Image (cartoon, rainbow, N blue to C red):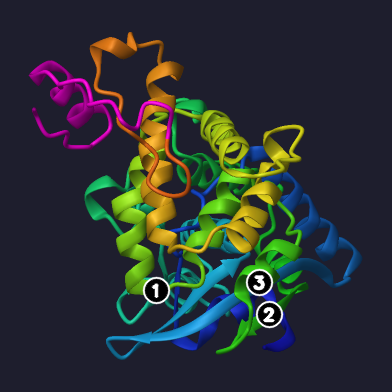
Amino acid sequence: MHVETKKLLDFLAADGAKFSIPLFQRPYSWEQWQCEIFWNDIERSAHENKSHFFGAVFYRKDCIDEETTLSLIDGQQRTLTSLLLLAALAERVDAANFADTDLNSAYITQTYLRSNGGIKVQPSKCDEAEFLRALNADKSQQSIDSEDSAEQRHNAIANKTFFAVKMAAADFDPLSFWKGLNSFEVVVVELEDGDNAQSIFESFNSKGVPLVAADMARNYLLLAESEEEQKRLYVNYWEPIQGLFGDDPGSLRLNNALRAWTVIRCKTPKAKNDSESFNDFKQYFVNEYDGTSEDLMEELLSFCIVWAENYRYHAVKKYRSSNWAKIGRKTLVSDRPLAPSSQQSRDFYSQHYGIEVKGE
C-alpha cells in the first residue's frame, strides 16, 4: 500500500477523480455534535495558525468506464461531511460576492463538488437521493423546507443546514475559515493488489461512529469480493437482511440476530454481548466453516426471517417460518414439512421484506 500525508483539500480535489462508497459500507451517520467538533477545530486552526490532523482515509483506486474512482474503504464519514461543508461554503461565498478573490463559488464547486460534469461522490444507495439534494445536484429538490425539523431530515441535509446556519452569522469570516480548513491534514492510504483490506479495516479505529458487529460481519463477507460480486451479494442477501428489521438504530436487532446465529453455529462461542459477537463470527468463518460466503449469507437471511418474526411479535403460526439451516448441522425441525403459506403471508413478506415466498 502507498501512504502519504496530504492536505485535506488536496485529497478532496482528487485530480478529477470521483469518490465512491462501496455497497457494504454503513449509511452516512455523522450527527450535529460531530459536525460541531469539526467546525470548532477549523476555527481553532485558523486562530492558532497550526495544522490539524483529521485522521486517515483508506481507498482503492478503480477505473470504471474510463473514469477514475476512489473507493473509500475507511474515512467515508469525514470525507462526505467535508463535501457537505464545502457545499455550504460555496453558497455562502456566492452570496457574499467574493468573485474577485481566489475563494469563490465556481472554484469550490468545480474543484471539490463536481467531477466530469457530475457530482463528486457516488454515495451508497440509501444516501444517494439526499446527498444529491444536499450537494445541489438534484435541481428539482434543491430547496430545504424550513418547517422540517432537523430530526426529520436525513443527516446529510441536517448537517449541511447546520454548517449553513453557522456561516450565516454576522461575525463569520470566510477567508479566515478557509485558512483554517487549509491547515487540515489527512494520512492517505491507497490500497494495492494483494493488500489485506479487511485486516486494515478491522484494525483502524477511525474518528467517528464506531462500527457494530453487523457492520463488521457484512464487510468481512463482502470486502474481498469484486465490485460486481459485492453488488450482487449485497442486493440478494444483505439488503433483505437489513430490511427485515425495519427502523433499527445502531443495528440493535440485527446484532442480536447475528449473535444468536453464532451461538448456534460456533462450537465454543465466547461473546458476552452483541458487540463481541463479530469475533465469534470471524473465528467460525476461519476455523470451522468451509463453504462459500454466499452459502453463509443465504443461511443468515433465512435465519433472520425467523428471528424477525419473533422480534416483530407476529404469531409465528400465521406466517411461514422458513427452514433456515443451509450449512452445517440442520435445525430440529428440518425433517418436517414447512407450513403452507397463505396469500396473506406472501403479501406480507413481499410488502415488508421484499422477499417473494412461493405458495404450496
In x, y percent, where is residue 317? 28, 11
What residue do we see at 38% from left, 41% from top? 301
Q: Secondary structure at mark 1?
A: strand
SS type, badge 2 = strand
Which segment is the magenta one? 331-360
Image location (x, y in percent) of residue 158: 51, 39
Q: Which dot marks residue 188?
A: 2
The reply, left or right, for residue 140 in relation to residue 227 is left
Q: Quadrant of residue 67?
A: bottom left
Spatial distance from mark 2 to mark 1, Cα to Cα? 21 Å
- Residue that label 3 marks: 57
Above or below, comparing residue 63 to residue 347 in the picture: below
First in sequence: mark 3 or mark 1?
Answer: 3
Residue 237: in magenta span: no
Q: Secondary structure at mark 3?
A: strand
**Image vertical order of residue 197 relative to residue 30, above or below:** below
Residue at point 52%, 47% (across, down): 160
Three-letter amino acid code of the residue under disc 3 = Val
Location of mark 1 (residue): 114
Type of residue at label 2?
Val
Q: Amino acid at mark 1?
A: Arg
- Say which quarter of the image contains residue 299: top left
Callout in the foreground (3, 1)? 3
Left or right: residue 82 compared with residue 341: right
Left or right: residue 78 versus residue 306 is right
Label 3 vs 2, first from the N-terminus: 3
The answer to whether residue 86 shows anywhere in this view is no
Mark 3 nearby-residue class (10 Å; few <14, some 14–19, many ≥20): many
Residue 122 versus residue 260 in the image, above or below = below
The count of marks equals 3
